[in-house]
Image (tube, rainbow, N blue to C red):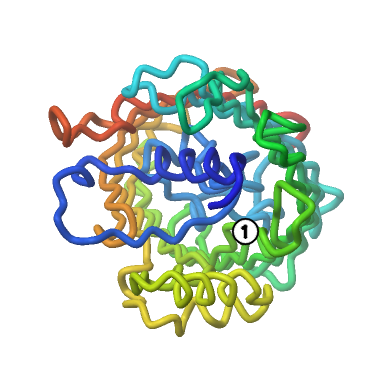
Amino acid sequence: MSSIARKIGSGIIALVMISNTISAQTAPINIVSTAVPFLRISPDARAGGMGDVGIATSPDANAPFWNLAKIPFAEKKTSLALNYTPWLKDLGLNDVYLASLAAYHKLDDQSAISTSLRFFSLGNIQLTDYSGNILNNIKPSEFSIDAGYSRILSEKLAIGVALRYINSRLVVGDVGTGVIYKAGTSVAGDISLFYHNLDTKGQGISWGVVLSNLGGKIGYTNDARNKDFLPANLGLGISYAKVFDENNKITFGLDINKLLVPTLPSSTGVYSTDSANLANYRSTGIVSSFMKSFSDGSNQLHDLQASLGAEYNYSEQFFFRAGYFYENPDRGNRKYFSMGAGFNIDVFNVNFSYLVPSGSGITRNPLSNTLRLGIVFKLGQE
């Protein structure tokens, strides 16, 4: 990337996407890079304990992060969720974190409104020139805020739509390079479906489909040619709930996600050819990029991320969770187990999740020891 802001963005992507075996691999890795990758970090402690499964699980206040269409089927009329995730603790970073808030209110038995906010602090970063001379110290941060509406279409099917504002403040002003940088901004939308097929005991199959972060590109200078794609994503989820008796219930969930962003053209080693290919890539239109993500010459199965999780529910009071996340080695090679727990206290629910350490030495997963804490306040009537 040509600008300092893009270099910082690339570094963030590398930190987020790095895996426990990336250093030991000899095969080339072609990560599908986008701007604002924080939109792909799971902010929800409940889902975090299940390997980041959330598209088709039972609805709660964190639904705006996963599938808005779940909200009309929620039990409570109003609910609010707060989550906090210290990020990349295994790298010794203490000032990088993701904080989030989400809430919904059911207008009636058929429809609901919702909102969510994510704030990602990237800590303190020291900028230097190519000679190592210090240019400046910055504290980059990013946030998004959205508003959504969801409605039941039939007894078991609902739809949800949301509009999101994104602000990525990596570098602002002149940091000694002669280039004026600005905060990158963009607008994106989500559309989702949720099919809720549970019997009177609360068991059965549910599924969901989500198109998220569909919007314009984002840039950090006034050069329209240097803009990056948002992390547009197609998500498919299914869950199965089994009720054994009035006190014991278990839910299994599976999410499959695919970025709707084409991979960067492979390097040929010829400067003029690579420059032309990159310019052509950056000039790709938004809708065209969605289509091209399925026909960019890459192995489509390698583009898929899978999350598999389970939740045991005892008497709607105590919850125990476990999950596994998989990403193909060609796309970053993130692989990890997670576990979590939760409990109900009157009008609120507390959730914890933990990403199990994996690897050792240079192969240790920097996402190891990731903790998430979440509180869901259940307000209003059933």
Q: Nearer the viewer, residue 349 or 333?
A: 333
Residue 231 vertical position relative to residue 195 in the rendered view, above or below: above
Query: Which residue is disc 1 drawn over?
Result: 228
- Tell me residue 186's x, y (percent): 76, 53
Q: Give the percent coordinates (x, y) of residue 15.
A: 40, 38
Q: Tell me if residue 241 comes above or below residue 88 in the rendering.
A: below
Q: Is residue 382 visible?
A: no
Q: Check disc 1: other Cα within 10 Å, few if <14, some if 14-19, many if 20+.
A: many
Most extreme residue toward the front is 131
SS for dot 1: strand
Q: In the image shown, does 158 or 220 lie closer to the viewer?
A: 220
Q: Amino acid at mark 1?
A: Asp
Residue at horizontal 34 percent and vertical 74 percent from the top: 268
- Horizontal side, residue 154 vs residue 262: left or right: right
In front: 341, or 40? 40
Q: Which residue is painted at 33% across and 48% down in the image?
A: 309
User: Which residue sits at x=34%, y=70%?
Assistant: 269
Say if 264 sits above or below 334 in the image: below
Q: Is 260 on the left-hand or right-hand side of 257?
A: right
Answer with the quarter of the image where residue 8 lies: top right
Q: What residue sits 76% from the left and 39% below the top?
A: 180
Is residue 247 visible to us here? Answer: yes
Residue 238 shown left or right of residue 381 in the figure:
left
Q: How many numbered circles are shown?
A: 1
Q: Which quadrant: the C terminus?
A: top right
The answer to whether 90 is drawn above or below residue 43 in the figure is above
The image position of residue 321, as x and y in percent, is 34, 36
Q: Where is residue 148 drawn, in percent x and y?
A: 78, 53
